[in-house]
Image (tube, rainbow, N blue to C red):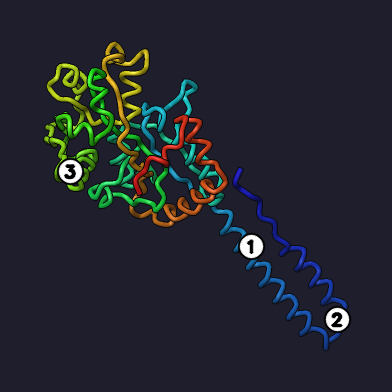
């Protein structure tokens, strides 16, 4: 689709020149030679420019397979999701590149992008200083992830947001320090020294029993991504759907999500930024947000 044929007029130009030489006198020979030289130089320059612009670089984009609606493989076996579709639109806007999408595991994505196996990886990734040392982050985030607290519905009159939860008890399910959520709660506590949340460090990244711990009263809230709550509790086939009427959710804020680039792909990241700004200006980004999330998540991002 992106390959274009290269046409050259070298042969035609030389043929005309030879014919001209045959009918020239001695005094005209130098003028013809000069014309030949100029034509050849111009043709060589044009061919070189066209060949350069026709070189399409293959870009490998890794994405997770089950993170609905961000990045997943749909029922047709196709790469799909909000972040995937944004990058497909980016691909269309950048004729010098051809994106190939590779569904893979979370670990392979991170290791693969860092090592150069993949150029880009998308997984609903948040910015962290540790990741910034391993990956190139573009200037423009690709999307957003709403995060908030899951709490017992019986406490819905007293817990309506993060601040009221801190006043209620602040007893939050522990979070692994390497989890970006830990830093968010730390930042909240720094800004609210008189209304703290109890921030404990968990041993593992995923706390599988968090919903049950909240229901049992062991803790009063679980800091959770909205899509995770919807998948596990709200959805009829969710693992904890039986507790849907006992658990409630309140959004705290939206965290920007970024595509992760290999550190060597600075030029690609810059091209992404330029194309993304165009897509945002023409309304494509908002259309994809509405299609996959039903709302504009960017409005919840704290600048």
- Total label count? 3
Q: Mark 3 against mark 2, which lies toward the viewer?
A: 3
User: Of the numbered discs in the image, which one, if any, rests on residue 24?
Assistant: 2
Front in this rendered view, residue 210 or 120: 210
Position of residue 14 measured from the top left corner of the image (x, y, whole percent):
75, 68
Q: Image check: 126 left or right of 204?
A: right
The secondary structure type at the circle numbered 2 is: loop
Front in this rendered view, residue 42 or 141: 141
> Dot 3: within a 10 Å radius of its alpha carbon, few (fewer than 14), some, or many (20 or more) residues?
some
Q: Are marks 3 and 1 in contact (CB under 8 Å)?
A: no
Q: Specify whether residue 188 is in view.
A: yes
Q: CA distance from mark 3 to mark 2?
A: 90 Å
Question: Which residue, given by chain and number where applicable, does mark 1 sit on?
Answer: 47
Q: Image check: 4 left or right of 297?
A: right
> Dot 1: within a 10 Å radius of its alpha carbon, few (fewer than 14), some, or many (20 or more) residues?
some
Question: Which residue, given by chain and number where applicable, does mark 3 sit on?
Answer: 189
Position of residue 2 measured from the top left corner of the image (x, y, whole percent):
60, 46
Position of residue 300 measured from the top left corner of the image (x, y, whole percent):
38, 40
Q: Mark 3 against mark 1, which lies toward the viewer?
A: 3
Depicted 235 relative to depicted 189: above or below: above
The single residue placed furthest to the top in the displayed view is 242
The secondary structure type at the circle numbered 3 is: helix
Front in this rendered view, residue 247 or 12: 247
Q: Are marks 3 and 2 in contact (CB under 8 Å)?
A: no
Q: CA distance from mark 1 to mark 2?
A: 29 Å
Q: CA distance from mark 3 to mark 1?
A: 62 Å
> Dot 2: within a 10 Å radius of its alpha carbon, few (fewer than 14), some, or many (20 or more) residues?
few
The secondary structure type at the circle numbered 1 is: helix
């Amino acid at each position: 689709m992106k390959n274009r044929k290269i046409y050259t007029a070298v042969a035609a130009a030389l043929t005309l020149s030879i014919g001209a030489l045959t009918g020239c006198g001695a005094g005209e020979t130098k003028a013809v030679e000069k014309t030949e030289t100029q034509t050849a130089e111009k043709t060589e320059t044009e061919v070189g420019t066209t060949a350069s612009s026709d070189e399409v670089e293959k870009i490998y984009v890794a994405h997770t397979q089950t993170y609905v609606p961000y990045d997943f493989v749909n029922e047709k076996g196709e790469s799909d999701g909000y972040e995937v579709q944004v990058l497909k639109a980016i691909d269309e806007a950048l004729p010098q590149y051809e994106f190939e999408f590779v569904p893979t595991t979370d670990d392979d994505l991170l290791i693969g992008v860092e090592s150069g196996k993949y150029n880009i990886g998308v997984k609903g990734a948040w910015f962290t200083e540790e990741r910034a040392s391993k990956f190139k982050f573009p200037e423009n985030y690709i999307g957003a992830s709403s995060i908030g607290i899951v709490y017992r519905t019986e406490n819905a009159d007293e817990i309506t947001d993060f601040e009221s939860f801190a006043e209620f008890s602040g007893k939050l399910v522990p979070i692994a320090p390497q989890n970006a959520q830990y830093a968010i709660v730390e930042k909240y506590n720094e800004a609210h020294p008189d209304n703290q949340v109890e921030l404990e460090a968990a041993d593992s990244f995923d706390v599988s029993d968090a919903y049950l711990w909240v229901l049992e009263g062991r803790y009063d809230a679980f800091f959770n991504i909205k899509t995770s709550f919807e998948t596990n509790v709200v959805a009829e086939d969710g693992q904890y759907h039986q507790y849907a009427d006992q658990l409630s959710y309140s959004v705290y804020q939206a965290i920007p999500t970024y595509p992760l680039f290999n550190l060597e792909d600075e030029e690609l990241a810059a091209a992404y930024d330029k194309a993304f700004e165009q897509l945002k200006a023409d309304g494509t980004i908002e259309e994809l947000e509405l299609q996959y999330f039903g709302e504009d998540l960017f409005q919840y991002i704290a600048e």
